[in-house]
Amino acid sequence: MDFSNCWLDYRPMEIKEQALSALSVLCEGEIIESAVKEYQLALSRMTGREPEVFREKTNRCVALYLEPLLPIGKDGYEIKKEKDSYHITGQSESGVLYGVFHFLRLIRTGHMDELPVSNAPEMPLRMMNHWDNMDGTIERGYSGNSFFYENYEILYNERIEQYVRLMASIGINAIVINNVNVHQRETYLITDTYLEQVKQYAALFARYGIQLFTSVNFAAPMELSGFDNCDPLNDKVAQWWKDAVKHIYEVIPEFGGFLVKADSEGRPGPFTYDRTHADGANMLAKALAPYGGIVVWRCFVYNCGQDWRDKKTDRARAAYDNFIALDGQFEDNVILQIKNGPMDFQVREPVSPLFGGLKKTNMILEVEIAQEYTGQQIDLCYLLPMWREILDFDTFSEGEGSTVRQIVKGAQYGQNCCGMAAVINTGNDYNWTGNDLAAANTYGYGRMAMNPSLTSEAIAKEWIELTFGAAVADDLTKILMDSWPTYEKYTSPLGIGWMVTPHYHYGPDVDGYEYDRWGTYHRADRNGLGIDRTPAGTGYTAQYNEPWSAIYADRNLCPEELLLFFHYVRYDEVLKSGKTLIQHIYDTHFEGVEEVEEMIERFDGLQNKLPGDVYDRVRERMERQLENAIEWRDRINTYFYRKSGVPDEKGRKIYE
Ligand code: GCV
């Protein structure tokens, strides 16, 4: 199998300390055994010598302990040095595993001086969503094909094991193995056609503290058993699900539950029967409850058959309008999965108002590691700073301090069924993520869900040191940290979004979605652009708590990076920078390209410090990024020059 070890690349290094070459395992369990294996593998790769493993106490060793009463939080751990030994104590088996991974990180990055450390995962659920299909394709996949499936068969090989180690090392504890768009064959994943193979995955995942979930087709009783409806209040339909779930748990006792996309983009759902999403989710939840399973139900529900002429219907309103009245009606084992913004993973969106609206419902924040709208792993876009802003956003749902972070970690309303979910960016490319640098997002997502107090910069640096070594850390950190603002500059201005090639979502096409049915408009005319979402417009701003509803509705208070998301603004209006809107558009697009050129120059300086293949792969993507940035710059600038007739005050080249 040909794949990179990513951040688990335990390259040879000199390790003098004798204690590290003995492991004393003072606890038991299959996850503990994974921790032991990982330590053995790491030490043998780094030193060329297999560490000795003792099942009793010895001197000068790394000792693993399990202490359920450790007052640190679920799956937490402590690492400390005592006399001539290191003690790694987990609150659970997973805690021990996370502790070992942390300890290995300290060894690799030379940060043993940070001891003692103690940590507990902050987000209860730290989930990955795969959009893998069983034919081997990946929806919005930019790194090759699926490593789970080929030709409707489930694969099992060394690569899958490596993948699971990568996930456990960043604290992932739940994985959904198939696309939320559940097609015909995938509907059978929960049946005997595939259950035995799914079980193999579930067992492997379980050895690393990870629960397996599947996306399910809400219409499965119709597709699999010839029902003429899938009405959630039909007793026979509910019974069908109970039987199906019972059987799943007979085969896979450690099964996590279901992820559901219903009534969205053509998927079936309860609306067909005039039922609510609470009816739909609760029906599945009741089937799963006896076994401890959960339903993760997506709020990405909107009308994708909109008429562009209709300026009152606003897609941004949809999730809130569909779900807010259902607050408090969901079973305890239902979690609503809410995309970070009200639209769809654009380069800049406000935070979904549902986070500040729902109070009696379990919630999980969904982000997209796969760079669907943010460069598709060709262009560099380190997303951690964006996620950080989202987590830090204060919803004011219960006064100041009711941040998204507080809400999704369960601290605001005391839910224990919550956390973060992300659409993963991996595939079967040698380097897993197409662009080697895109793995910073994969790694960073897990680290941030474990510990949102870590800064984006610290996570970037840690990832670089583990993957490529300290010599390139400063330059690569700078490259990563600048990448989101740069991408934003040369693509869509001030939160407007959607000026992308339709369906494909890479590269510019300003009017590509403008007259389409998806509810994604910029409304540019000869005087200005932007969507009026104030009470005078679509009224979307009213979905926020105060002070946000007032701030967003006020042209002068609205954060400028979101100005065009909330307001129609004339080209000649002056922004806080003192520039007119049109000049801002020209300037940012010129700057964006210049910044890509600077990034390439900086990266070239690392040529001799990076492995040749990594340099070549990333450099080739950077060339494509530059072409893309130029195309964006010229198309956007020309488009708005043609619309407005206003020349660039700096006289730069804008095509007519
Ligand atoms: C899996 C966007 C993407 C779709 C995706 C959908 C979703 O619309 O373009 O590919 O479908 O989001 O999140 O369900």
Image (cartoon, rainbow, N blue to C red):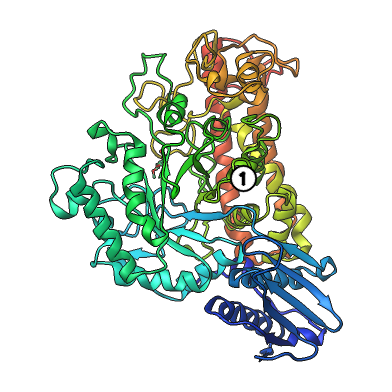
Residue 128: x, y in percent? Answer: 49, 55
In the image, is 572 to the left or to the right of 458? left
User: The residue under label 1 is which amino acid type?
Assistant: Leu
Image point 75% across, 64% down: which residue? 118
The kind of secondary structure element at disc 1 is: loop
Residue 597: x, y in percent? Answer: 68, 42
Give the image quadrant in which the ligand numbered 1 is located: top left
Asked if one can make out residue 604 in the rendered structure from this viewpoint, the answer is no
Label 1 packing within 10 angstroms: few (<14), some (14-19), many (20+): many
Asked if one can make out residue 65 in the rendered structure from this viewpoint, the answer is yes
Image point 53% across, 71% down: which residue? 208
Question: Which residue, given by chain and number where applicable, does mark 1 sit on?
Answer: 383
Looking at the image, residue 410 lies above or below residue 136: above
Residue 266: x, y in percent? Answer: 29, 37
Q: How many badges with numbers are in the image?
A: 1
Residue 317: x, y in percent? Answer: 46, 24
Looking at the image, residue 115 lies above or below residue 353: below
Q: Nearer the viewer, residue 441 or 612?
A: 441
Q: Nearer the viewer, residue 338 or 159?
A: 338
